[in-house]
Image (cartoon, rainbow, N blue to C red):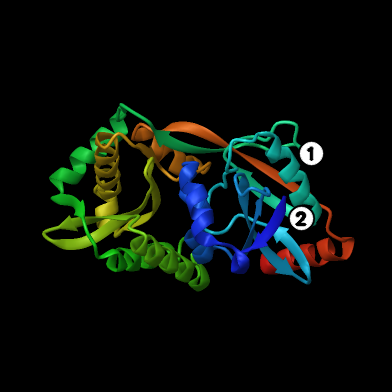
């Protein structure tokens, strides 16, 4: 078992391992390069089992953390015994961490924290009354959803609509989102829908493609299109196309009740992922971190 830094990693071999295991898009090297501050992988000696490890370094202390626009990581490989051993090695190498995993690690050395939820559709789905009403409203308003290659225009709407509403949409993270979308396009894994009214773009949604899934990344619409049900219309279009292709539709997910309710209105079912946290950092580091967090809230 060994840690390999991204600069020393055979990324083609790593990405082939991700594809072989049908893992989520968040574990690909190009995804991590776009979203993570820095990252390692931990693999066995035969390069058959592994996990990606995004991390940050502050005051000389390395911490595992979930990058922006990433939900979970996957253990790759079929050796289940590797997972508990790997988690123990990760905790030893990194003094602190917050690791989000799609599957729980049995016989782990740390109890998993409260589970988080996301939503998926794996087959037939039903819209509830709220979704049906909003879809009817969108059609009466003259909205139309169609595929577009102009994801930069959609990204600009996302920036203008969300940057003032969501603190995480600062300049740094918006640049990470742009870099991610460039990488997705290069890897032929970008799917973008535009919300139009009389051929004028009023919103859109960006999705990530794998062989198994279509995963929602981000989307937004101007207020008039949003109130007219444009987001419902766009999501319903993406879901229908995905299910027709016999793939899983993944909403990206959220435990935020409003987002979760939107996803469930459109037929999404809850799935869980698991959080492992630990903190063996020096007391002085935790004290400085606490002071900084209190100062940041002012």
Position of 102 relative to 173 (above/below): above
Residue 28 appears anywhere in the view:
no
Which sits in the foreground, 240 or 255?
Answer: 240
Residue picked out by circle 2: 96
Q: Classify mark 2: helix, strand or loop.
A: strand
Which residue is at the far left?
198
Which sits in the foreground, 217 or 203?
Answer: 217
Q: Residue at x 30, y 26 (%)?
A: 124
Image check: 45 left or right of 255? right
Instruction: Report the Cα–Cα distance between label 2 and label 1.
Output: 14 Å
Q: Percent from the top left, x then y, of residue 223?
A: 30, 57
Q: Earlier in the sequence, mark 2 or mark 1?
A: 2
* Viewer-side label of 2, 1: 1
Q: Quadrant of the C terminus?
A: bottom right
Residue picked out by circle 1: 109
Q: Percent from the top left, x then y, of residue 1?
A: 72, 50
């Amino acid at each position: 078992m060994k840690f390999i830094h991204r600069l020393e990693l055979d990324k083609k071999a790593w990405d082939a391992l991700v594809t072989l295991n049908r893992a989520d898009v968040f574990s690909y090297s190009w995804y991590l390069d776009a979203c993570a501050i820095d990252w390692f992988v931990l693999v066995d000696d035969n390069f058959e089992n592994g996990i990606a490890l995004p991390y940050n370094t502050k005051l000389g202390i390395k911490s595992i953390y979930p990058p922006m626009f990433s939900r979970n990581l996957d253990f790759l490989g079929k050796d289940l015994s590797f997972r508990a051993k790997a988690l123990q090695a990760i905790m030893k190498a990194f003094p602190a961490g917050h690791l989000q995993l799609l599957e729980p690690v049995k016989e782990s050395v740390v109890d998993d924290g409260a589970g988080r939820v996301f939503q998926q559709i794996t087959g037939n789905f039903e819209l509830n009354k709220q979704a049906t009403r909003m879809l009817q409203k969108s059609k009466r308003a003259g909205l139309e959803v169609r595929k577009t290659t102009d994801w930069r225009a959609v990204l600009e709407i996302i920036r203008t609509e969300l940057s003032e509403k969501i603190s995480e949409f600062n300049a740094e993270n918006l640049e990470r989102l742009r870099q991610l979308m460039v990488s997705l396009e290069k890897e032929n894994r970008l799917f973008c829908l535009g919300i139009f009214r009389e051929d004028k773009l009023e919103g859109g949604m960006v999705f990530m493609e794998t062989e198994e899934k279509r995963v929602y990344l981000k989307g937004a619409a101007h207020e008039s299109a949003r109130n007219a049900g444009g987001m419902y219309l766009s999501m319903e279009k993406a879901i229908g196309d995905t299910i027709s292709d016999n793939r899983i539709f993944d909403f990206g997910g959220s435990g935020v009740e409003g987002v979760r309710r939107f996803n469930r209105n459109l037929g999404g079912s809850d799935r869980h992922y698991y959080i492992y946290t630990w903190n063996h950092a020096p007391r002085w580091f935790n004290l400085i971190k606490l002071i900084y967090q209190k100062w940041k809230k002012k």
